[in-house]
Amino acid sequence: MISKKQALAIAIFPLLGIADQMKASPEEDRPNIILFLVDDMGWQDTSLPFWTEKTSYNEIYETPNMERLAQQGMMFTQAYASSVSSPSRCSLLTGMNAARHRVTNWTFPKNGSTDRKSDVLEFPKWNVNGICQVADIPYTYQVTALPQLLKDNGYHTIHCGKAHFGAINTPGENPHHFGFEVNIAGHAGGGLASYLGENNFGNKEDGSANHPFSIPGLEKYWGKDIFVTEALTIEAISALRKAQQYEQPFFLYMSHYAIHVPLDKDMRFYPKYIDKGLTPQEAAYASLIEGMDKSLGDLMDYLEANNLADNTIILFMSDNGGLSSESNWRSGMLHTQNYPLNSGKGSAYEGGIREPMIVSWPGKVSPNSRCDKQLIIEDFFPSILEMAGVEEYTTVQPIDGISFIPLLEGTDDSSLVRTLIWNFPNLWGNVGPGIGSTCTIRQGNWKLIYYYETGEKELFNIHEDIGEKNNQAALLPNKVKQLSKELGSRLRSMDAQRPTLKKTGEQVAWPDEI
C-alpha cells in the first residue's frame, strides 16, 4: 500500500503499476462530493470573470450559480485539461497524463481512429478503445478508476450524463465497469443527438437509436417538452434522495452533455438572449450555458434544503475549451469565442486547454477566494481521494496527478514551479490556430508548443501575453532549448507516442532533437 507521501512521489516520478489494495480514513463523517463537469465550456462562457477583468462575454452570459459557488469557495484561474474530451475524462478517472494512457483523441468506433487525415503524418496506434478495468482488451489502458476506489472505501457512487471513457462495444463504454453503482444516461457517445425530449433525445419510438449519439436511459421523458439538462438534473436529485437513505457518503459525477453542439434552443432562456441582440446561434449557445448553470443551482438548492450543504464538496470543471475554430467561422456557425485566449477546442493554445474551475469545501476553503497557480485535470484523482479520506490506496496504473489540497488550504510551497505537459500526436477534426499534431509544455510563465508536422516551435510568456500573439522562440533560443529538453525527457519517461513521416516512414523527431 502507498501513503499520501508515497503517492506524491509516484506522481512526480511515476514508475511501475501497483497492486490493488486500499484503506480509508477512519473518520466517520466523511464529506459528500459532487464533481460537476461541463462539456466544451470555454474559460469565458460565464458571467464569472476568470481573468483580471470582465470581458464582453462575461457581460453577455448569465451564470448566477457559478457566481454563487465562487462566493462559497475558490476560483482557479489557471486550471487545465486536454483540448478534446476523451483524453481529459480518462485522465480524470485515472490520475494519468494523456501522454501515458495514450487515449489522446476522442473515442467512439471500436478499433477505429477519429483522426483527421494528414498528407504528411501517419498517426500512431493510440488507444482508440479508451480506458478499461480489465486487461488484454486491444487498444485500451487497464486502470483502477477513481469511482472504484471511492466505492471500495464506502462511498455510494453515481454517474449522471456523459461518460466517453471507452469506445462502443468495449468494457470501457459502461460507467458501471469503473465502479459507478448508478449510471444515468452514460454510454460511449462523445456528444448528443438532441437536447429535446420531444425528439426523444435522438431515439426512435421503438427504442432504437436514430443517431450514434442518441442518449440512452431517459425514456420517461420522451415526447415531453423538456431539455436534457433539466431531465438529468431531476434524475441526479432523485439519485441523491435515494443515497440519503443509505446513510453513506455519496460521490456524484454530474457530467453534463451541455454545452456541446447541437445548438438546440433551451426555450427557458433563449428569448432573453435574442432580446440582448445575439444571433440565433449565439442565443442558443447562451441558453445552453444558462441551463447548465440552473442545474448547478438546483443541486445546491437541494443540498441546502436537505441539510447536506455543510458537508458536501462541490468541484466545477470543464473537459476542454469552447468550440471556436476556423471551421466554425467558415460555416457561419460560430457561436462562442474564448477572448482573451487564442483559439478553442482542439487547439494547444490557451483557448483549447484552459478551463473554468471552482471548488467549494465548507469549513476548509476560504469563501470568495482565488488561486492563480497551475494545475491539470489528472490532479483531480489524488485530490478527490484525499478529500474522501482515502489515505492509502493502490492502483494498477502509475499516478501523474498531484493533489491540489495544499492550494485549497493555502499551505502550498510557493517556491515550487509546476511543470505541465500535453501530447497530441493526432489531428482533430476542425482547423484553426494551434490545431495540429502537437506536444506542449507549460513551466512557470513560459509555454512551448512543438508541431510534429513541421518541426516548428512557438514560445510564449503567458503571464505577459495571455492571447499568445507574440512568439518569442527566435528571440530566446536558450529558453526554447531548455523547455524542449524538459518536454522531450518527460514524454520519453511516459512512453509517449509520436507520429511517423509518410515520406520516409520514420518517426518524427522529439522536440529536443531539433
Image (spheres, grey):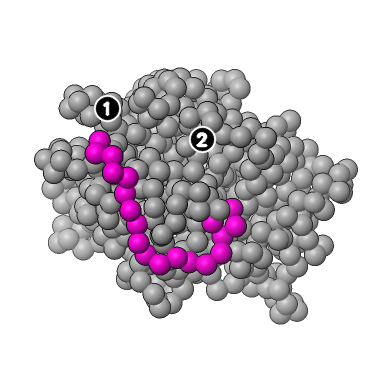
Picture coordinates of residue 101, whole percent (x, y)? 51, 63
Which dot marks residue 406?
A: 2
Q: Are marks 1 and 2 in contact (CB under 8 Å)?
A: no
- At x 59%, y 72%, the residue is 124
- Residue in view at x 47 percent, y 59 percent: 106
Residue displayed at 86% across by 48% down: 478
449 horizontally vs 238: left or right: right
98 is higher (above) or lower (below) than 290:
below
Report the Cα–Cα distance between label 1 and label 2.
22 Å
Left or right: 333 as drawn, with respect to 168: right
Answer with left or right where residue 236 lies relative to residue 42: left
Of labels 1 and 2, earlier in sequence is: 1
Q: Which secondary structure, mark 1?
A: helix
- The outermost residue toward the left is 245
Please report the bounds of the magenta region as a residue range: 10-29
- Residue bearing mark 1: 309
User: Is 489 part of what is drawn in magenta?
Assistant: no
